[in-house]
Image (spheres, grey):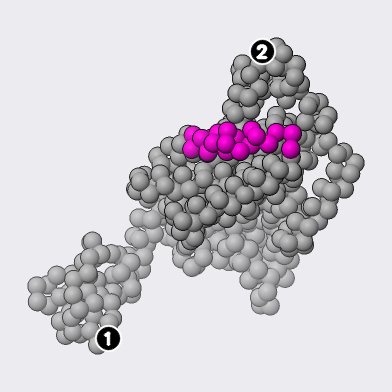
């Protein structure tokens, strides 16, 4: 309301002396309630009169608006308000600035308040004060700082000492921003690698134990993503709870589909890899068309919960988005749980026994058919969980899985068939390599170069980073 008053958008309706918010519409005004924003009516110019105020009153109101914004209970709101003020060149009264510097506890907000303080020092008459402010501004990477220093460098009327000091501070900021860009690229690479690990780890389990090349693995990821969208559709208004509930539900649904595929098709084609590949490829086409028939060919968007929106500002110029942080943590959690399951449970013991020597495991009483079914279900369920994570990064559509199936196979081959640690290292390495190459070569050429590098690596180490002894490898 105060901002509307300063902007001259508040009026008094003459019929009942009610204060309204007015917006020009044709030859009249569309008025609304300033307290609720609810539209009232369209009136003629004579039906309202503008609230007038002096320039000094506007200055007082602007100071009051700034003080209200800086006193917001949420630190993010205060930070965004200060960013807008820095961008617009809004001044903060010295008394308000000093008080907020004493009271402010959030480090990101304090950094912005200190920038305002140094900007005030730049306007002082003392050359030493201005030089000291320029030197201290080199510690900040905020775009407004760079713009202010750049204006000093490019202004021919500025003192030469000030221009040289500003140029030196700009070089320091540029070097720091260069390192921030590298760290940001590394962060994006780790997040992409985490997605690849989630997409490939289920494939590594089934391929390592059963020797099955499951071309329908991408569609199992897609089913997990659609499960997330379906749960959110059934639970509107609670995206966070819906996302949490989607994780076990996607695991169960994708795992159940995996059991059906294994029991009905795959178990009849063991020791026949070419037929298995073709059969699962056909299943992938069936699943894609089924989804198109049920949900339509258009992509669906999944709402990101509030606690995964926004970013964590480490320092000005370096921010880590919460959704990618959540996916990295989720990937590590899933990896740790799978390690515990395989290394600390009876099922894991039987799974490792069948992977190493199927005939000996059967001779010792292990039901290999049951282990195969549960392994395929586990790998399929983990693929569904990967779909839940992917739904937070991209739209959900029938072709979602096809974007990751090739990369998943590359991760499995590079890491070593059936080795979880190899899958983790290979997935993160491929993700980081992809993001490092993209700025230099472009997205398409980066993938080509990465593929060439993987081919050369496989020529040297055909069994991957962590070769595993066992029935599949020996064959």
Element type where label 2 sits in the image: loop
Left or right of 326 in this view: 64: left
Q: Dot 2 surroundings within 10 Å: few (below 14), some, or many (20 or more)?
A: few
Please name which of the two marks, 2 or 1, marks the residue nearer to the observer. 2
Magenta-colored stretch includes residue 277 = no
Q: Which residue is mark 1?
A: 26
The first of marks 2 and 1 along the sequence is 1
Magenta-colored stretch includes residue 260 = yes
Residue 110 higher or lower than 157, as above or below: above
Assign the N terminus to one quadrant of the image.
bottom left
Per the rendered image, the range of residues in magenta is 251-272
Q: Residue furthest left?
A: 16
Q: CA distance from mark 2 to mark 1?
A: 86 Å
Residue at 81 percent across and 56 percent down: it is: 449
Q: Nearer the viewer, residue 8 or 210?
A: 210
Q: Nearer the viewer, residue 5 or 448?
A: 448
Residue at 61 percent across and 16 percent down: it is: 346
Residue at 55 percent across and 51 percent down: it is: 286
Q: Dot 1 surroundings within 10 Å: few (below 14), some, or many (20 or more)?
A: few
Query: Residue 365, labelled with which disc?
Result: 2
């Amino acid at each position: 309301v105060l901002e509307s008053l300063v902007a001259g958008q508040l009026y008094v309706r003459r019929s009942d002396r009610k204060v309204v918010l007015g917006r020009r519409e044709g030859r009249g005004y569309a008025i609304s309630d300033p307290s609720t924003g609810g539209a009232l009516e369209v009136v003629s110019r004579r039906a309202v009169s503008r609230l007038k105020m002096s320039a000094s009153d506007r200055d007082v109101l602007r100071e009051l608006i700034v003080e209200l914004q800086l006193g917001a209970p949420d630190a993010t709101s205060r930070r965004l308000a200060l960013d807008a003020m820095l961008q617009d060149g809004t001044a903060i009264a010295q008394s308000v600035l000093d008080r907020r510097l004493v009271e402010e506890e959030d480090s990101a907000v304090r950094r912005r308040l200190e920038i305002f303080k140094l900007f005030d020092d730049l306007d002082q008459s003392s050359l030493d004060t201005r030089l000291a402010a320029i030197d201290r501004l080199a510690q900040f990477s905020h775009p407004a700082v760079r713009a202010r220093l750049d204006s000093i460098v490019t202004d021919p009327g500025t003192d030469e000492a000030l221009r040289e000091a500003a140029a030196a501070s700009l070089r320091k900021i540029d070097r720091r921003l260069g390192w921030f860009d590298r760290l940001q690229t590394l962060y994006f690479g780790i997040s992409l690698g985490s997605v690849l690990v989630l997409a490939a780890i289920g494939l590594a389990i089934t391929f390592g134990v059963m020797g099955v090349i499951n071309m329908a693995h991408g569609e199992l990821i897609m089913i997990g993503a659609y499960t997330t969208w379906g749960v959110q559709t059934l639970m509107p208004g609670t995206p966070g709870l819906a996302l949490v509930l989607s994780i076990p539900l996607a695991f169960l649904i994708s795992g159940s589909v995996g059991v059906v595929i294994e029991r009905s098709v795959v178990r009849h084609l063991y020791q026949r890899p070419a037929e298995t590949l073709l059969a699962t490829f056909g299943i992938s086409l069936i699943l894609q068309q089924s989804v198109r028939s049920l949900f339509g060919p258009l992509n669906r968007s999944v709402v990101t919960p509030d606690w995964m929106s926004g970013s964590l500002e480490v320092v000005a110029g370096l921010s880590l988005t919460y959704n990618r942080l959540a996916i990295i943590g989720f990937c590590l959690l899933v990896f740790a749980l799978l390690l515990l399951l395989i290394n600390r449970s009876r099922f894991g013991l039987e799974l490792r026994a069948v992977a190493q020597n199927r005939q000996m495991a059967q001779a010792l009483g292990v039901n290999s058919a049951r282990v195969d079914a549960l392994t395929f279900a586990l790998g399929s369920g983990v693929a569904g969980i990967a779909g839940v994570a992917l739904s937070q990064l991209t739209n959900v559509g029938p072709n979602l899985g096809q974007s990751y199936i090739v990369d998943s196979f590359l991760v499995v081959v590079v890491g070593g068939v059936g080795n979880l640690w190899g899958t983790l290292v290979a997935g993160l390495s491929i993700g980081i390599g992809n993001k490092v190459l993209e700025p230099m070569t472009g997205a398409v050429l980066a993938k080509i170069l990465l593929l060439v590098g993987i081919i050369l690596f496989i020529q040297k180490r055909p069994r991957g980073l962590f070769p595993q002894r066992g029935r599949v490898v020996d064959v």
